Image (cartoon, rainbow, N blue to C red):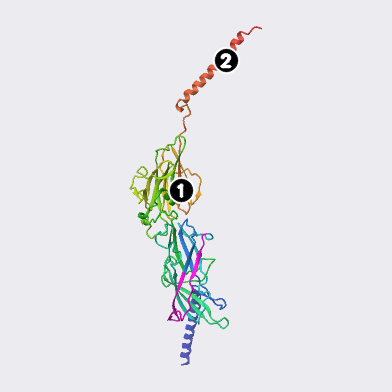
Amino acid sequence: MTKKRTSKFMKLGSLAVAAMMCLSLAVPAFASNLSITDDPSKPAQAAINKVLKMPIGTNVPDATFQFDFTRVSVDGETGTALNMPELPSRTVEFDSKTMTASPAGTGVVSVNKETVNIVDGVVWPHAGIYVYEVEESDKTNESFIDDEYENDLDVLRLSKAVYTVTVYIANDDAVGLYVYAIEAHIKANDDSNKGEPVGKKVNPTPDPDGDGSRMIFTNIYVRNNGGGGDPEDPDEVDPGTPGKIDEFTVLKIEKEVRGALGNREDKYFEFDVTVQAPVIGFDEPEKLRYVAYVMEMKGGALTVVTSEDNYDGTILEDESNYKYIMFTPDGEETVNLKHGQWLAFINLPVGSSYTAEEAESDPYNISHILTLSGSVGSEIKNASTGYQWVGELANKALYINTYGMTPPTGISADNLPYAILIVLAAVALAGYMALRFRRNAAQHPTSA
């Protein structure tokens, strides 16, 4: 009997040791995915990490983002204003003057900033487990929070993420009530924790010098710096006047002819032009449509001159009867421009890209000068711009055609050998006459 009891106790002891080992392994894993403290004088903290993703070339906007909390429960009971404290809304402010975005993949930049500690200043009535939900408010940035181009400039797509936040309040003889731990679970996901399942626990610990809290809300901001209308609904595009078209122009592809023999009157030069949508910001980028007018100065006035000389496809008219060419993402269009004309795109979002290539046209030499978001480059002897991004400031590809033939100088190259022979003959005759004169002078000296 004693042996059986001893055996049972040994088994129980072994199970206890195994359980303790498992627990010792589990605690670090548990603690690594939440905010927790082992010092009551330094309570646990949590922060929300606001991430703003933008197409490349976009500057950080001035914006305020707000996050609102809703009571869920306390110790398993439904939360109300009577049995659990309010978690105040927290905000993050982005400043265009002091913040810059960093590369976050091909064609994308991002910037992030954390809120203050979300439980800072909260007075807890007693120890227990308090549960809240947090989501982003749509009450800020109302000037450009919309899926449409309400002001023809900006689109801010709000985060759809929702997190469940659980706050553990404990007692301590020295400090009283304190925040022992805070954990966060994904209730609804967005691009923030892409691929993570609903219910996944994420670490909300503040990390301002690293990647930041994993309680992330990601917004996408797209700017149409031209203000020429919504590329998702081009039928509404109507700048009204050539002056407005010029004001709204995001990208110019311009033609200039140089050289004494260059035809600046009626010779057209052929271009293949392709425009691509930004990498992010649009659910169906293939449905975007870009509007471009052919313009030139006539009699000192801006004039829209889009015609069949410029484009042999379908030419459209806006509501003010100005003709334009419609471009689709990744669709190559052939456009012809003569000296002094330019192709003006008015509704390209920042972060769009383009390529332009001019066809050879002997005897003209081709070069171009690129202006990339206001920065003017040097002249390059190349027919293609290559792949270029559209930035917030001026964007232009100035194509220069220089007449390559050397103007005639009065002597044809074909007649040059004969001219040389004539010159040599003249020199020889002059030499012969001089020699004969000397001989005659020697044979008949002048008498004194």
Quarter the C terminus occupies: top right
**Helix, strand or loop under label 2:** helix
Crowdedness of circle 2 by 10 Å Cα count: few (<14), some, many (20+)?
few
| Towards the viewer: 310 or 383 | 310
Q: Give the numbered dot on residue 145.
A: none
**What amino acid is at disc 1?**
Lys
**What amino acid is at disc 2?**
Ala
| Towards the viewer: 198 or 72 | 72
Question: Residue 369 lies in magenta, yes or no?
Answer: no
Q: Residue 433's spot in the image, x, y percent? A: 55, 14
Q: Please give the residue where the numbered disc 1 appears in the rendered image.
A: 396
- Please report the bounds of the magenta region as a residue range: 67-96
Q: CA distance from mark 2 to mark 1?
A: 68 Å
Q: Please give the residue where the numbered disc 2 appears in the rendered image.
A: 434
From this view, report whether residue 392 is shown above or below residue 297.
below
| Towards the viewer: 447 or 274 | 274
**Helix, strand or loop under label 1:** strand
